[in-house]
């Protein structure tokens, strides 16, 4: 029995020692960045980080290691505010970066520091339906028909879900010539057809794709194209609605953290590289719409032209949209509770 | 009276049968599914998934966090059980109630408590930041969360054992001139060793499998603050099912090893008790 206890003790010691192993090694020519991102960018940044590391090594001789953290955009923003040491944040919507800026971690004018509203790539909200489109879903109007089951995550927690919600609202608003009451009625009817609200975009995709729930998934175009690639074109089809919202996922350097780590230069270069031809190309490969006209032309066949409106045009920016629609007691709470 | 026996035997058979079916459906089948999914694309893919740098780091971190929290909880557990069973003091009942608190509180809530305490916006946050101490989103926070969640396991195992044994042996040792430490090492510890081992094993199993509390304080940085359960979730969300199940199977293997050690210790305790009874 003594031997058994000894064994346990030595096992835990071994575990302890081996656990301390790899944290060493921050020599002069090595630098580490933490990129805190949202859910559907996992595959994209895996690829991008590898190329950026090679580019940075060639340019400066420094070895850069980029650590990734992924989760729902709002939750990730919260973690950074609570002290998660992100050198850069690449989130789903600017409201989540604004929230970090409000805590003084990022300068208030962050969105003007990089081109294109600090969103190096964009996406649109589209519909993913099952093969053959058995319910004949063609446009937003089909989603509010009785008997259609729509999958979309919870706008209170998920950035992607907020884009979905605003896309529907914007469509109804345009169709009814700016009548807010009619738009509200449309969105209410839409959410009546939602059987389950997942907390994040990836969770909603899993619900639709793997668990086989629902007739149509409201998704980021990149997420829809990715599921099609992962699970085969013979299982799912993408439907482009007549109008949708231009989703602009923004990026920013977290000033307070890079100044503490001394990583501002490499963090800035990391974000700049997103705008380079190479970076734009990787984004396009991972189904994000590139900003660069040159790269966009090359991938034109992958991204059908659709009529896209922006949040600033229709809702007057995120701050306002957030307050009216998603704050506690806001319109979403009212229409979802009435159910 | 052979008649009443027969229905009883039938009932017994049905009950055992139902229990076995239940066990099979809810334990054996899922366990088998984990391994079959993990090996779906062959042993090479399996090994590749487990040898992945992020997976290895998750395994290492899980063992580290478990080792620290189990050691701490063993010390806390013995001390608390010792105090409760061998001494009379005010507030004893309150202490007994508090021990069960981690069972009652949802792990996610306990994780959030640590964020509220140690996070940058938390009560101690500014002080920690000024002194460059990282607790949340780093290993210390994950250890704290795990210690909190697994605290009751050792104590809860020890209290009945120590109560059953009473204080006589210790009192004898003390009256014969043994010191406090000597009494503890030579009288108390040998008496509780199997119960202690059982508690430690349970505590360890829970520590390695903890998801909720750790998820809240981890920050999900791959290769740095991901434990096995968190890594499984990430892989699954990345459509990387084979790797997810491969890493999950490692957790399952750890659980099975735990189970075997647990059965051994139970069997040993039983034999010791029987031996003691025979002596009397």
Image (spheres, coloured by chain):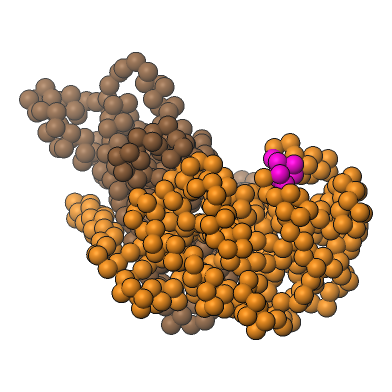
The colour assigned to chain B within the rendered structure = brown
Asked whether, in this view, residue B153 is left or right of residue A189, the answer is left
Taking depth in this image into account, of A263 and A139 the one nearest to the observer is A263
Asked whether, in this view, residue A199 is left or right of residue B168, the answer is right
Residue at 36% in and 21% down: B92
Give the percent coordinates (x, y) of residue A324: 75, 41
Give the percent coordinates (x, y) of residue A24: 25, 61
Q: In this view, does A29 lie above or below B169?
A: below
Chain displayed in orange: A
Residue at 71% in and 77% down: A303
Residue at 90% in and 58% down: A175
Give the percent coordinates (x, y) of residue A225: 68, 74
Magenta-colored span: A320-327
Asked whether, in this view, residue B197 is left or right of residue B101, the answer is left
Q: In this view, does A8 lie above or below A319?
A: below
Please name the predominant secondary structure of the magenta segment in the image: helix
Residue A326 highlighted magenta (yes or no)? yes
Taking depth in this image into account, of B243 and B75 the one nearest to the observer is B243
Taking depth in this image into account, of A262 and B186 the one nearest to the observer is A262
Q: In which quarter of the image is the C terminus of chain A?
A: top right
Taking depth in this image into account, of B199 and A78 the one nearest to the observer is A78
Give the percent coordinates (x, y) of residue A27: 24, 64
Does residue B15 appear anywhere in the picture? no
Does residue A334 appear anywhere in the picture? yes
Farthest residue to the left: give it.
B177
Asked whether, in this view, residue B203 is left or right of residue A120, the answer is left
Query: Image quadrant of residue B241?
Result: bottom right
Residue at 58% in and 70% down: B239
Residue A25 highlighted magenta (yes or no)? no
- Number of marks in the rendered image: 0
């Amino acid at each position: 029995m003594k031997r058994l206890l000894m064994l346990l003790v030595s096992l835990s010691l071994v575990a302890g020692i081996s656990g301390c192993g790899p944290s060493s090694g921050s020599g002069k020519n090595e630098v580490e960045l933490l990129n805190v991102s949202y859910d559907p960018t996992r595959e994209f940044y895996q690829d991008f980080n590898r190329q950026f590391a090679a580019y940075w090594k060639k340019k400066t001789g420094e070895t850069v290691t980029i650590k990734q953290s992924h989760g729902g955009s709002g939750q990730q923003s919260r973690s950074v505010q609570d002290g998660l040491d992100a050198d850069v944040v690449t989130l789903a919507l600017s409201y989540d970066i604004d929230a970090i800026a409000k805590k003084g971690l990022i300068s208030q004018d962050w969105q003007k520091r990089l081109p294109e509203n600090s969103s190096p790539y964009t996406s649109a909200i589209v519909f993913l339906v099952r093969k053959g489109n058995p319910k004949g879903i063609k446009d937003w109007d089909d989603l509010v028909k009785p008997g259609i089951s729509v999958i979309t995550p919870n706008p209170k927690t998920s950035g992607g879900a907020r884009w979905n919600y605003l896309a529907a609202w914007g469509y109804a608003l345009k169709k009814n010539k700016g009548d807010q009451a009619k738009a509200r009625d449309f969105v209410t009817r839409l959410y009546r057809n939602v059987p389950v609200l997942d907390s994040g975009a990836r969770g909603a995709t899993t619900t639709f794709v793997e668990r086989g729930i629902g007739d149509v998934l409201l998704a980021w175009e990149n997420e829809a194209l990715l599921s099609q690639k992962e699970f085969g074109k013979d299982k799912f089809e993408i439907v482009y609605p007549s109008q949708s919202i231009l989703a602009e996922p923004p990026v920013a350097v977290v000033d307070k953290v890079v100044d503490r780590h001394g990583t501002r230069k490499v963090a800035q270069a990391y974000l700049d590289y997103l705008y380079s031809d190479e970076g734009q190309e990787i984004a396009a490969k991972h189904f994000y719409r590139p900003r660069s006209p040159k790269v966009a032309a090359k991938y034109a066949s992958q991204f059908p032209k659709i009529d896209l409106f922006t949040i600033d045009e229709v809702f007057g920016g995120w701050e306002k949209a957030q307050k009216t629609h998603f704050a506690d007691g806001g319109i979403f709470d009212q229409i979802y509770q009435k159910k | 009276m052979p008649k009443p026996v027969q229905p009883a035997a039938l009932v017994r058979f049905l009950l055992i049968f139902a229990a076995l079916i239940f066990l099979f459906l809810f334990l054996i089948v899922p366990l088998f599914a984990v391994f079959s999914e993990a090996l779906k694309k062959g042993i090479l893919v399996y090994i590749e998934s487990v040898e992945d740098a992020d997976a290895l780091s998750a395994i290492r971190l899980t063992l580290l966090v478990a080792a620290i929290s189990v050691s701490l909880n063993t010390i806390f557990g013995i001390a608390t059980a010792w105090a409760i069973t061998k001494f009379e003091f005010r507030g004893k009942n309150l202490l007994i109630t508090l021990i069960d608190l981690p069972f009652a509180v949802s792990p996610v809530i306990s994780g959030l408590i640590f964020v509220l305490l140690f996070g940058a916006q938390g009560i101690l946050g500014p002080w920690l930041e000024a002194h460059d101490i990282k607790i949340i989103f780093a290993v210390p926070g994950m250890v704290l969360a795990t210690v909190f969640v697994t605290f009751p396991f050792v104590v809860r195992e020890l209290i009945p054992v120590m109560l059953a044994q009473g204080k006589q042996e210790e009192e004898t040792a003390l009256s014969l001139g043994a010191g406090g430490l000597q009494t503890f090492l030579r009288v108390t510890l040998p008496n509780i060793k199997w119960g202690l081992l059982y508690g430690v094993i349970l505590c360890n199993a829970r520590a390695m499998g903890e998801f909720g509390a750790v998820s809240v304080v981890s920050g999900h940085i791959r290769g740095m603050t991901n434990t096995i359960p968190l890594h499984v979730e990430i892989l699954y969300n990345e459509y990387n099912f084979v790797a997810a199940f491969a890493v999950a199977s490692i957790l399952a293997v750890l659980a099975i090893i735990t189970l075997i050690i647990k059965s051994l210790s139970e069997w040993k305790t039983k034999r010791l008790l029987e031996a003691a009874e025979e002596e009397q």
